[in-house]
Image (cartoon, helix red, strand yellow):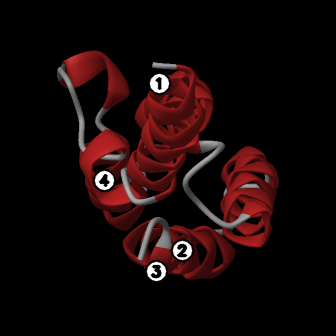
Amino acid sequence: MRRFLIIVIPIITLIIFVFIMLSGTILKKPFGKFDDVPGSIDDIIAAVNDEDWDDAANKLNGLEKAWDKVIFRVQFSSERDEINKLSTCIARLKGAVTAQDKSGALMELYEAHNHWVELGN
């Protein structure tokens, strides 16, 4: 029995760790409207194209809240560098929306979308 436990416990532990490390693509998908990062990015793109800066700022707050929820889920299964780059894009986007810089905001939005696609791959 002891030999069985010595073999089974490490194997089960390794299986759990492998599952956690490979779960990034599953965990980054939205579980509801409150954590839909790609949907929020698309909404902000539409608001910036219409130059509706107040709506873009409101949707940016929603994006920040959604991203905070998703970070908690994917922090162990995604590369830290991609998480940091997406967080930096959101911070730069906040500056571009505050300055009402359409080209800067669109650049950051499309870069954030690219980092989102790469997250968990």
Q: Which residue is mark 4?
A: 38
Tell me the distance, in whole angstroms, between the alpha carbons under discs 2 and 4.
11 Å
Could you tell me the amino acid type at mark 2? His
Q: Is residue 100 visible?
A: yes
Image position, residue 86 (x, y; %): 66, 61
Q: Which residue is mark 2?
A: 115
Asked whether the residues under the numbered discs 1 and 3 touch, taking CB atoms below 8 Å apart as contact, a structural biologist would say no
Q: Which residue is mark 1?
A: 62
Tell me the distance, in whole angstroms, between the alpha carbons under discs 2 and 3.
4 Å
Tell me the distance, in whole angstroms, between the alpha carbons under discs 2 and 1.
18 Å
Residue in the picture at 58% in, 60% down? 78
Residue in the picture at 43% in, 37% down? 12
Residue in the picture at 41% in, 32% down? 55
**Other-residue count near label 4 (Cα within 10 Å), few / some / many at <14 / 14–19 / ≥20:** some
Image position, residue 115 (x, y; %): 54, 74
Q: Is residue 4 above or below residue 76?
A: above
| Snapshot quadrant of residue 24 | bottom left
SS category of the residue bearing label 2 = helix
| Snapshot quadrant of residue 81 | bottom right
